Image (cartoon, rainbow, N blue to C red):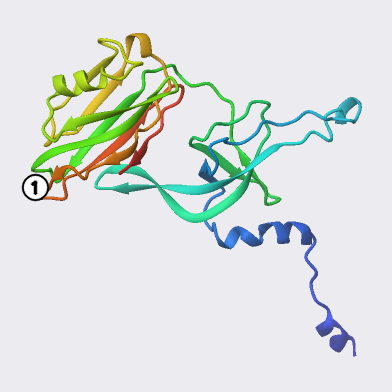
Amino acid sequence: MMREEASKIVNTPSRPSQELAFAEAQDFPSSDVYVALPQETSGVPALTKLGTGTDTNAQEGDQPGSARCDIYKVSILDEIAQLTLIGHDKEVFNLSTTALEQDWFTVHRTNFGSWMAVTGGVCASQNAILQIHNIGPAGGGTFSMDLNVLGVTDTLTFNYDSTAAQTKAEVETHTQVALDDVLVSGDMPFVSVEIEFQNNLADTHIAVPTNVDITNLVDGPGTGTPQTQRHRSNPCSHTERVS
């Protein structure tokens, strides 16, 4: 009889709420730190201080800002690191009193299933560096891209075989880039071109260029598709690449 009753006993989880919170772990089996990019240009709003408690719980009731973010992982392709969308989007919370712009940041999934933006920390000051990779290479023509500097976006156009000096001259046509504000190394199309922002633009955040237009390129032996990559951008180093 006792054995019969024992067979009916089901082991009840001691922490059912946590098991529910961990249900989505099947989507992310190996780690709890990821890379996120807000879906909206407004980024992630700051935390609003509405705390109504007293003493040790004085900040209870504060409201974290949140926004829907796409989740990425770092992949290595042909020895180049790039961020790859993994097909998930999550509501990410911001515990900082400073809003987060629409840019890359790391996120942490807590033991209770919430996704938190990782903010703070100290990073060394450094110049922003952009890289242009002309895969293929192309056999002729031009390509263009939109570059935002200090909130102003201008379209830059490069020959498929621009020298370092020609690339430098074209970048300096941007209304926010003065003479010698950039240092350029590498000649297209056979090597990567590196553009470092210096002098008036030293320690300045430079976003990866957008709207890369290759319709005027003539294909060579390969694809002839240029790619831009942000190798680092003040205040913290990270890599971002778009086609």
Q: Which of 147 and 76 is in front in this view?
A: 147
* Quarter of the rendering occupied by the N terminus: bottom right
**Image point (36%, 16%), residue name:** 176
| Neighbours of disc 1 within 10 Å: few (<14), some (14-19), many (20+) | some
- Is 69 on the left or on the right of 140, as rendered? right
Q: What element carries label 1?
A: loop
**Image point (19%, 33%), residue name:** 192
- Is 51 on the left or on the right of 199, as rendered? right
Rendered location of residue 53, percent (x, y): 90, 30
| Residue where numbered disc 1 is placed | 220
Rendered location of residue 68, percent (x, y): 60, 46
* Residue type, label 1: Gly
**Image point (16%, 43%), residue name:** 217
Rendered location of residue 208, percent (x, y): 37, 33
Rendered location of residue 233, percent (x, y): 40, 25
Residue 196 lies in what quarter of the image?
Answer: top left
**Image point (26%, 18%), residue name:** 173
- Image position of 147 with respect to 68: above or below: above
- Is 150 on the left or on the right of 29, as rendered? left
* Quarter of the rendering occupied by the C terminus: top left
Residue 61 lies in what quarter of the image?
Answer: top right
The mark total stands at: 1
- Image position of 116 with respect to 186: above or below: below
- Is 243 on the left or on the right of 167, as rendered? right
Q: Nearer the viewer, residue 67 or 143?
A: 143
